[in-house]
Amino acid sequence: MDQAQKLRNLVKVNKDNDNKDIKIYTIASGKGGVGKTNVVVNTAITLQKKGKNVLIIDADLGLANIDVILGVSPKYTLYDVLFKDIDLNDALLRGPKGIKIIPGGSGVLEMTTLSVDKQEELAKEFLKLKDIDTILIDTGAGISKNLLSFVTFSQELIIVTTPEPTSLTDAYSVMKVISKYNLKKDIKIIINRVPNEKMAKSTFNTLKKTAKNFLNINLDNLGYILDDVRVMNSVMKQQPFVLGYPRCLASKCIYSITDKLLNGKKSLKKINSIQEVYNRLIKVFG
């Protein structure tokens, strides 16, 4: 008998939220240092400003990058929720403009080996989350079991890369694994730290052609972020650049990316409630 079945029975669709459309995005990169977490945080804030209720799940092992960008420090992590009886709402970090963050820490790894009892406990905690319609999952760089699990969990995969050959090679390696396990046929791409629009388009077109010819994966150009010194200035100030420099080139690029996310084609797999979100999570990790 499927041990996860009672969890799936527990997680019923909330009829009061049938009109709610929850979007789940996994954001990945082939290598570290491409600015992925910076993209996640600034995109989350911009989506929140545009009326969305955004939750970031830190699926990297620790909060170092988010700590640097936001200047926040978690009192508790997912590990504390799982093994120290901490309420999930108490572990939530509140960020700028009202975004919410679940600090992952080592708890992300523990999710792959949870007992059924622990899964039930987490289910009850997860269902306490309210007013969320957009989930951004900030994964660790490179290829891992956790990345593949979260790709399966999410509706959309976004890969952040730079025009550097090593970054593009590593991004392609991630796509190769995604193709091997047939996890996604469509992947969104963000080209970060480009000197101009021409290079951004050239980089994307080369990547798109290669992915289509050799992996049979379709790439969607979500946008690019121009190389901007004010991004580094913002990191030094521990303030997201869309707040510290809302009119800078990088911020304008983020606005364009969020507009594409908001106005893009509707997902075929509509999610109507936070209960259904957890149901997807159980199917992956349970």
Image (tube, rainbow, N blue to C red):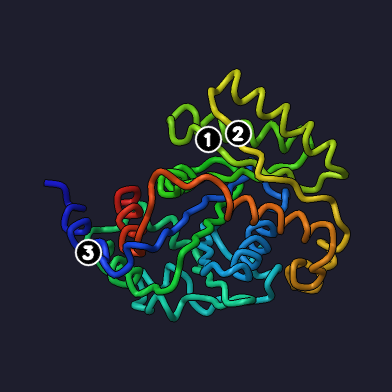
Q: Residues within 10 Å of mark 2 (few under 14, many from 20)?
A: many
Q: Where on the picture, by quarter, is residue 231?
A: bottom right
Q: Residue at x 88, y 59 (%)?
A: 229
Q: Residues within 10 Å of mark 1 (few under 14, many from 20)?
A: some
Q: Residue at x 72, y 57 (%)?
A: 254
The answer to whether residue 100 is left or right of residue 153 is right
The residue where tag 2 is placed is: 219
Q: Residue furthest left?
A: 1
The residue where tag 1 is placed is: 186
The residue where tag 3 is placed is: 117
Q: Earlier in the sequence, mark 3 or mark 2?
A: 3
Image coords of residue 95 (percent x, y): 60, 75
Image coords of residue 270 (percent x, y): 38, 51
Gap in Å between the C-alphas at discs 2 and 1?
6 Å
Q: Earlier in the sequence, mark 2 or mark 1?
A: 1
Q: CB under 8 Å between callouts 2 and 1?
A: yes
Image coords of residue 233 (percent x, y): 85, 67
Query: Helix, strand or loop at disc 1?
Result: strand
Gap in Å between the C-alphas at discs 3 and 2?
40 Å
Q: What type is the residue that disc 1 sits on? A: Asp
Q: Where on the picture, by quarter, is residue 176?
A: top right
Q: Which mark is residue 129?
A: none
The answer to whether residue 28 is left or right of residue 124 is right
Does 86 appear above or below 196? below
Q: Residue at x 32, y 62 (%)?
A: 18
Q: What type is the residue that disc 3 sits on? A: Asp
